[in-house]
Image: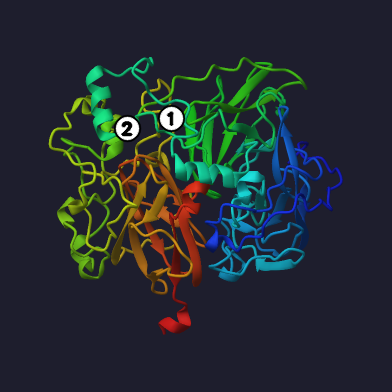
C-alpha cells in the first residue's frame, strides 16, 4: 500500500464495558443475553492500522462506537473497527497472540486461510475459544497469497465490529503492477444489541423489513400477483432480513456521510480489494463512470473480466483493477441488495473532492423463479461429468432421480436463470409451497421447513437480486475462469446433495432440516483426498452465502474442470441449486455454514470432518 495506511499508534487497553452475563462458546449460542456488546467503555475509532511480521499481538476489547452521530455497542481488535490490517507474505511462519479482554469468551477465525484445523478459530468445533483474560497463540505457516479477512466466531460479536482485513503478498511479489493498492471493507453498523436483533427476528421475522408491500404501495405488481403472494402468505419484498432503517452501511468503518476517500492521479492503475465484512448484508458495488476489471475472488486469481457492477455476498472478496480518467472524483457505491441504503467512498484527485452520488434505485421484487418454480425451462444440459464412471450408489440422497440433476454446464441467460417475469403470472391453483414429497428421505421433515423448491435449477449465470435487468455489464459466476489451472482436476467419484432449509416466520435455518447443535452434531464426512461434487439446493426465498472453512472448492460454473474458479464462499440464489467440486485434503473438523450471521446463529451450520491420511491408510 503506497500511502493509505498511517502508522499511528495502536490503541489498546480497552475497558471491559458494562457487566454482562457470560455465555458459552458459539456452539451453545442461542442464549439471547450477554456477548460482550457494550455501549460503555472508550470510544472506538473507525479505520485501521497495519501490523506485520513473524509475531503479531492482537487484543480484543469492548467499547462504544459513534457512526454519523449514532451510538452503538462495539467490539474492537487493537482498539479500532475494523481491526488492524494484517499483512503477511506467502511462505512465512506467523505467530498471532490473541488476548481476550472481554468479560465473555471470544475467538478469531482466519477466513479463507489454509491452516491446521486447531487454529481455525471456531469454538465448539476446532478449539474451546478464548476465555476472558486469556491469550491464545495461533501459529501456522502461510501457504497462500491474496485478499482475506478475519473475524470473531463467538456469539454475535462480528456484528459489533470484531473483524478486520488481511493481505498476503505472493512469494516473489505481486505479478500485476499497480500504482496504488487500497482496501474497501464494507460492513453494517447498528445501534442495537445484536442479541436483541436475534430475539426480534425469532419473534417476528419481518420486524426489521420496512419495505413490505401493501395494497397502497407503488410496487409494479398487478392485483393478480398481489393476490397470489397473499395466498402464499409470503412477501415479494422479503429481500433482506435487516435493512437501512436499522443498519448504517460502512466503508472501512465510516458511514456514507463520513468522508471515506482514496486519492489518485489520472491515468494510474489502482487495485481495490473489496471485502464484505457485513454481518447480514449483500452489496451491489459500482463506480459510476469507471469499469472494474475483476482479477481475483476469495483471494484466488481469475482471468481478468471487465464489468460495471458486481454483487458481493457476506464474506466474499473481490480484487478489481480500476483506471480513473480525467474526472476530479468518482463515487464508489456499495448499495445494499434491498436498496435501503449504501456504503459510500470516494476516489478523489485531491483531498475533499466529491463526485455526484446516485440515488438509491427502486427495491427489487422476488419472482416465482426465486421460489424454485422454473417451469418450462427445458434447456438444462449435463456437462463436465462422466456419469458412467461415477459411483452413484455411494452418493448422498441415493434415491434421487439422476435424470433431474443439473450438473453444471447449463446454457441459460441471466434472465431465464433468474425466473422470467412471465413466471410471476402463474396461477397458484393446485400448487403446494411445502410439498415435502419432493425432498429425499434423509431430509428431516418438521417445523423448520416452510418451503420446498418445486423445480430448482442451476443459476450460476444469475447476477443476483436487483441486477437482472440493468443495462450495463454485471458480474456473474459463469464469467469467472481460474487464472492458474487447478492442480486436481479428477472426476468426482461421489455426489453429496445438501438442502438449504428454513422457516422464515419462526426464523429457523438449517441444512437438510436439521439445525446445528454441537451436542448432537452428526458431521459431514469426507475420506482423505477423495474428490466430491457437492450440490446445494436452496429451499428458501433468500440468497445464502455458503462458506466452507479450511479448504477451497471449485465452482461448477461451465468451465473445464482445470479452470473452474476456486472459492471458499459461494452464493446460492433463492429457490436454486449450485454445485462445487472439492478435494478433501485438509484433515480435521471444519465449519460449513451460511455466512449471514443470524442465519448461522439460527442453525444453518454443520461440521465437515476430513479423515487424515494416517486413518485412510
Q: Position of residue 84 (x, y in %)?
A: 74, 48
Chain-order first, disc 1 or disc 2: 2
Observer-nearest of 210 and 186: 210
- Residue that numbered label 1 is attached to: 474
Q: Left or right of 585: which side holds 261?
A: right
- In three-dimensional space, the C-alpha distance between marks 1 and 2, rounded to whole angstroms, equals 10 Å
**Residue lying furthest right:** 9
Q: Please tell me how crowded label 1 is: few (under 14), some (14-19), or many (20+) other residues with Cα within 10 Å.
A: many
- Residue that numbered label 2 is attached to: 414
Residue at the spot 66% in from the left edge and 68% down from the top edge = 140
* Quarter the C terminus occupies: bottom left
The colour scheme of the drawn protein is rainbow
**Discs 1, 2 touching: Cβ within 8 Å:** yes
* Residue 443 higher or lower than 383, as above or below: below
Image mark count = 2
Q: Position of residue 434 (x, y in %)?
A: 23, 46
Q: Please tell me how crowded label 2 is: few (under 14), some (14-19), or many (20+) other residues with Cα within 10 Å.
A: many
Q: Position of residue 517 (x, y in %)?
A: 46, 64
* Residue 457 higher or lower than 324, as above or below: below
Observer-nearest of 248 and 50: 248
Observer-nearest of 257 and 610: 257
* Element type at mark 2: helix
The answer to whether residue 53 is visible is: no
* Quarter the N terminus occupies: top right
* Element type at mark 1: loop
Residue at the spot 66% in from the left edge and 52% down from the top edge = 169
Observer-nearest of 376 and 26: 26
Residue at the spot 16% in from the left edge and 29% down from the top edge = 427
Q: Left or right of 98: which side holds 325?
A: left
* Residue 234 higher or lower than 198, as above or below: above
Residue 526 position by quadrant: bottom left
Amino acid at each position: 500500500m503506497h500511502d493509505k495506511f498511517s502508522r499511528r499508534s495502536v490503541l489498546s487497553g480497552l475497558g471491559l464495558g458494562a457487566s454482562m452475563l457470560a455465555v458459552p462458546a458459539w456452539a451453545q449460542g442461542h442464549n439471547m443475553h450477554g456477548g460482550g456488546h457494550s455501549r460503555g467503555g472508550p470510544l472506538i475509532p473507525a479505520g485501521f492500522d497495519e501490523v506485520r511480521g513473524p509475531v503479531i499481538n492482537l487484543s480484543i476489547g469492548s467499547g462504544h462506537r459513534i457512526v454519523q452521530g449514532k451510538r452503538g455497542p462495539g467490539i474492537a481488535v487493537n482498539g479500532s473497527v475494523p481491526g488492524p490490517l494484517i499483512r503477511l507474505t506467502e511462505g512465512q511462519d506467523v505467530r498471532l497472540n490473541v488476548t481476550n479482554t472481554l468479560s465473555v469468551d471470544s475467538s478469531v477465525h482466519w477466513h479463507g486461510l489454509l491452516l491446521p484445523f486447531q487454529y481455525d478459530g471456531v469454538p465448539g468445533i476446532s478449539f474451546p475459544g478464548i476465555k476472558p483474560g486469556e491469550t491464545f497463540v495461533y501459529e501456522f505457516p502461510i501457504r497462500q497469497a491474496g485478499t482475506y479477512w478475519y473475524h470473531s466466531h463467538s456469539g454475535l460479536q462480528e456484528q459489533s465490529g470484531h473483524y478486520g482485513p488481511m493481505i498476503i503478498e505472493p512469494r516473489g511479489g505481486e505479478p500485476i503492477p499497480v500504482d496504488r493498492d487500497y482496501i474497501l471493507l464494507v460492513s453494517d453498523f447498528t445501534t442495537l444489541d445484536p442479541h436483541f436483533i436475534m430475539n426480534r427476528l425469532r419473534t417476528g421475522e419481518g420486524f426489521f423489513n420496512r419495505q413490505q408491500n401493501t395494497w397502497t404501495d407503488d410496487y409494479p405488481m398487478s392485483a393478480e400477483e398481489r393476490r397470489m403472494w397473499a395466498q402464499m402468505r409470503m412477501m415479494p419484498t422479503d429481500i433482506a432480513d435487516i435493512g437501512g432503517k436499522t443498519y448504517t452501511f460502512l466503508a472501512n468503518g465510516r458511514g456514507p456521510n463520513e468522508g471515506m476517500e482514496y486519492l489518485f492521479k489520472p491515468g494510474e492503475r489502482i487495485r481495490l480489494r473489496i471485502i464484505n465484512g457485513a454481518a447480514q448484508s449483500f452489496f451491489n458495488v459500482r463506480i459510476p463512470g469507471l469499469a472494474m476489471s475483476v482479477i481475483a475472488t476469495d483471494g484466488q486469481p481469475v482471468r481478468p473480466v471487465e464489468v460495471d457492477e458486481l454483487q458481493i455476498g457476506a464474506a466474499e472478496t473481490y480484487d478489481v483493477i480500476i483506471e480513473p480518467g480525467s474526472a476530479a472524483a468518482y463515487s464508489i457505491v456499495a448499495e445494499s441488495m434491498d436498496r435501503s441504503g449504501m456504503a459510500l467512498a470516494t476516489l478523489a484527485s485531491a483531498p475533499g473532492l466529491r463526485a455526484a452520488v446516485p440515488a438509491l434505485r427502486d427495491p427489487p421484487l422476488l419472482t416465482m423463479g426465486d421460489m424454485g418454480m422454473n417451469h418450462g425451462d427445458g434447456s438444462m444440459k449435463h456437462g463436465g461429468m462422466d456419469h458412467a464412471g461415477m459411483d452413484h450408489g455411494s452418493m448422498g440422497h441415493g434415491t434421487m432421480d439422476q435424470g433431474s440433476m443439473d450438473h453444471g454446464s447449463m446454457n441459460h441467460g441471466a434472465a431465464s436463470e433468474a425466473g422470467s417475469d412471465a413466471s410471476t403470472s402463474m396461477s397458484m391453483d393446485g400448487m403446494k409451497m411445502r410439498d415435502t414429497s419432493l425432498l429425499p428421505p434423509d431430509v428431516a421433515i418438521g417445523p423448520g421447513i416452510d418451503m420446498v423448491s418445486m423445480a430448482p435449477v442451476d443459476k450460476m449465470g444469475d447476477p443476483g437480486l436487483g441486477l437482472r435487468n440493468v443495462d450495463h455489464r454485471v458480474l456473474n459466476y459463469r464469467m469467472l475462469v481460474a487464472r492458474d489451472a487447478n492442480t486436481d482436476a479428477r472426476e468426482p467419484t461421489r455426489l453429496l446433495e445438501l438442502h438449504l432449509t428454513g422457516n422464515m416466520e419462526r426464523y429457523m435455518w438449517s441444512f437438510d432440516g436439521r439445525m446445528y447443535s454441537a451436542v448432537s452434531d452428526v458431521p459431514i464426512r469426507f475420506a482423505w483426498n477423495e474428490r466430491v461434487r457437492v450440490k446445494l439446493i436452496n429451499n428458501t426465498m433468500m440468497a445464502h452465502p455458503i462458506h466452507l472453512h479450511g479448504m477451497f472448492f471449485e465452482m461448477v460454473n461451465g468451465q473445464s474442470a482445470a479452470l473452474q474458479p476456486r472459492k471458499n464462499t459461494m452464493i446460492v440464489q433463492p429457490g436454486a441449486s449450485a454445485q462445487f467440486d472439492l478435494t478433501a485434503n485438509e484433515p480435521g473438523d471444519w465449519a460449513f455454514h451460511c455466512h449471514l450471521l443470524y442465519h448461522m446463529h439460527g442453525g444453518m451450520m454443520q461440521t465437515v470432518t476430513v479423515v487424515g491420511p494416517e486413518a485412510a491408510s
